[in-house]
Amino acid sequence: MVRPYTITRGRTAPERDDFSLITVLTTTQDPRDEHGMPLLAGRLQPEHRHILERCRRPAAVAEVSADLDLPVSVTKILLADLVSQGLLLARAPLSVARASGGADMGLLTAVRDGLRRL
């Protein structure tokens, strides 16, 4: 068993504070060598490599944390490391991103019309 503070090298907070449980993560283009191993594999911890592999398909912070079987606070530190290295992209879920940019009037109109028909 490895203690969480060992995995994070003693850090208790991520460099970024904008991760929520539903922040969506995606691995950026991951250059590989002739054996299919990530070029940065030698410089990354096993947990970092697991995150990059897991996030080849978009995943939420909560999903990644559950897959790693680590506390969310520890996972966020590891995610921030990968984002700062340009190996991982983090974005708000589409529904949240749309809401912050304004409401989709077509959707709201359809909901209103559907409610009126009830």
Image: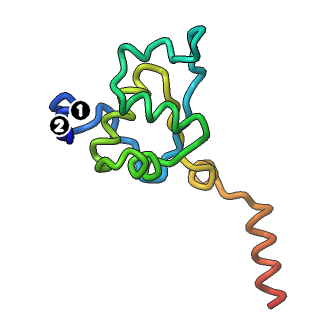
Q: In which quadrant of the rendered image does the C terminus lie?
A: bottom right
Q: In which quadrant of the rendered image does the N terminus lie?
A: top left
- Residue 62, labelled with which disc? none
Residue 47 in the image: above or below residue 109: above
> What is the x, y in percent for residue 73?
28, 46
Q: Is residue 114 left or right of residue 76?
A: right
The quadrant where residue 68 appears: top left
> Label 2 neighbourhood size at 10 Å, few (<14), some (14-19), many (20+)?
few
Q: Is residue 60 left or right of residue 118?
A: left
Q: Residue at x 52, y 17 (%)?
A: 37
> Label 1 neighbourhood size at 10 Å, few (<14), some (14-19), many (20+)?
some
Residue 19 in the image: above or below residue 82: below
Residue 70 in the image: above or below residue 82: below
Q: Give 42 or 12, whichever is nearer the viewer.
A: 42
Measured in 3D between alpha carbons, the distance from the residue under mark 2 to the one under mark 1, in whole angstroms, is 5 Å
Q: Residue at x 47, y 51 (%)?
A: 63
The quadrant where residue 77 appears: top left
Q: Is residue 91 left or right of residue 81?
A: right
- Give the number of marks: 2
Type of amino acid at the residue the image marks with label 1: Thr
**Residue bearing the label numbered 2:** 5
- Residue 8, labelled with which disc? 1
Image marks 2 and 1: residues in contact by CB distance under 8 Å: yes
Type of amino acid at the residue the image marks with label 2: Tyr
Residue at the bottom extreme of this rendering? 118
> What is the x, y in percent for residue 51?
45, 35
Q: Residue at x 29, y 50 (%)?
A: 71
Q: How is the image coloured?
A: rainbow
Q: Is residue 50 left or right of residue 58?
A: left
Q: Give 91 or 98, whichever is nearer the viewer.
A: 91
Q: Residue at x 57, y 25 (%)?
A: 28
